[in-house]
Image: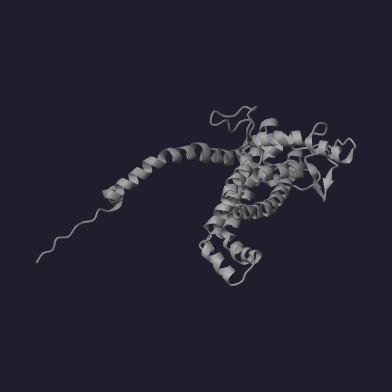
Amino acid sequence: MASATIERPRGRRRWLGGREGAQRRFVAVVLSPALAYMAVFLLLPIAWAILLAFFDFSSRRTGSPFLGLGLDNPYVGLEHFKRMFDFSSTAPLEVRQFHTAVKVTLLFAFLVLPLNLAITLPLAAMIESVRDRWKVLYRTVFFLPVLTSAVGVAIIWGFVLNPQRGLLNGMITRLTGRFTSIAWTTDADLVFVGIPVALIAIIVAYLWQDIGYNLVIFIAALQSIPDSVKDAARVDGASTWQTFRYITLPLLKPTILLVSVLTMISSFQVFDLFQVMTNGGPDDQTRALSLDIYESAFRYQRMGWAAAVSVVLFLLVLTISLVQSRFLKANWEY
């Protein structure tokens, strides 16, 4: 007896046919605007920056009709990247400024991260422990700075730290009874435990704006921990601190890793606060990589060099993102 067989569509027909094919076409149509946006405003600038890194490019010079490259904007290959490893005293100014920018950026990022965690995690635990009617108020108060633009934050803290009419100097004058005029962001000799006070001022402004964002993440993570786990610890005689230390904290490990990586990436990309509050001064003590890229490209018209520095910054951020992916794979569920 002959049996009828149904031939299943293969290849492109199978992918586009039937109900699943209709769903795939719908998803493709819905995602098309977002993909086009990413291609034009994300991938193309990255590709253009990588291409420029191999040319000694300046918009003031004459280039070939194709993207302005060639002629007076010659191809230099890996020359920009080789110069970054010139640590001699005779290195060009842009190379020495790049080395300074790397140090400032790393110092800023590795100071911001532990301070941010030390503030936001206990604060989130405290807010989560208060009554419900106060939770909304605390969340709103701490989240308000996040809604403020970075330029606005920089201007606010500029007024606070003003040497003549600043709020901080005014408070010190009121407390000590003596007129105080400390140049918090412009005095190069003002250092605290080896860290320029100007950089500390930017760190304070950054934390003031950023803790609200991480606070919301930690509160959401705390609310997702089942009450039954904490109740079981209390039944076994654990104190509040022991419950937090041995139950809550280990369960928050994925969130702590997520916040750590997001904060680290964000701190590498800060530009507004450095530009508005100090503009890299005093004596390049706050010259971050983002500010170094901006000044090299648009102030000194060294766009090829600035593109090479931006590639280095991109690789740093990409490395951190890969570390994030690796760590977040482990123990994600609890």
Task: Please give the name of the residue rendered at 23% of the width and 56% of the height, measured from the top-left corner.
Answer: 8
Image quadrant of residue 304?
top right
Q: How many marks?
A: 0
Q: Nearer the viewer, residue 277 or 317?
A: 277
**Is 82 placed left or right of 175 in the picture?**
left
**Residue at the bottom extreme, as displayed:** 236
Q: Nearer the viewer, residue 188 or 130?
A: 130
- Image: 329 above or below 87: below
Across and down, in percent, residue 283 comes to: 80, 39
**Residue at the right extreme, as displayed:** 178
Residue 145 visible in the current orientation = yes
Across and down, in percent, residue 169 comes to: 82, 37
- Image: 95 above or below 130: above
Q: Nearer the viewer, residue 128 or 295?
A: 128
Across and down, in percent, residue 279 comes to: 73, 35
**Is 243 placed left or right of 104 in the picture?**
left
Task: Please give the name of the residue rendered at 49% of the width and 36% of the height, measured from the top-left corner.
Answer: 40
Across and down, in percent, residue 254 comes to: 57, 59
Residue 311 visible in the current orientation = no
- Image: 214 above or below 39: below
